[in-house]
Amino acid sequence: MQKYKGSFILLHSMPHPRKRHIETIFSETLKFSPIVGLFGHRQVGKTTLVSSFAKEYRTLDVSTESALIRSNPENYLINRQLPFAIDEAQNEPVL
């Protein structure tokens, strides 16, 4: 433990992925909606969760992906394996 301004912070890593109740909710939502947004705090497992469900996964942290979107946003979304996940989508408002 590390003491910080009167609070205790327990630092540890997860030795294996944890089953989370949100997985069931996320799975059920995908059955009813082609587009699902996932929002949350930093480093809580959003990317891990989404990539585990996606048959195709892209992140917009990579500049080449952003360039493809800007050149033709409609074509970027066509012919993808579903479910298709776009991480960091807020980086490309054109979507």
Image (tube, grey):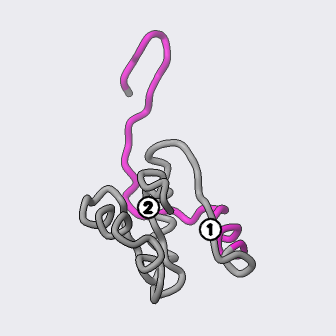
Q: Which residue is mark 1?
A: 23
Q: Which is nearer the eye, 71 or 91?
A: 71
Q: How many marks?
A: 2
Q: Quadrant of the N terminus?
A: top left
Q: Which is nearer the eye, 73 or 26?
A: 73
Q: Which residue is mark 2?
A: 87
Q: Earlier in the sequence, mark 2 or mark 1?
A: 1
Q: With 81 as the anchor, is 37 left or right in this view?
A: right
Q: Badge 1 local density, few (<14 within 10 Å), some, or many (20+)?
A: some
x, y percent for residue 3? 39, 18
Rendered view: 69 above or below 10: below
| SS category of the residue bearing label 2 | strand
Q: Residue at x 62, y 68 (%)?
A: 23
Part of the protein shown in magenta: 2-29
Q: Residue at x 45, y 85 (%)?
A: 80
Q: Residue at x 68, y 71 (%)?
A: 24
Q: Residue at x 50, y 63 (%)?
A: 95
For badge 1, the amino acid type reads Glu
| SS category of the residue bearing label 1 | helix
Q: Which is nearer the eye, 9 or 89?
A: 89
Closest to the camera, between mark 2 and mark 1, is 2
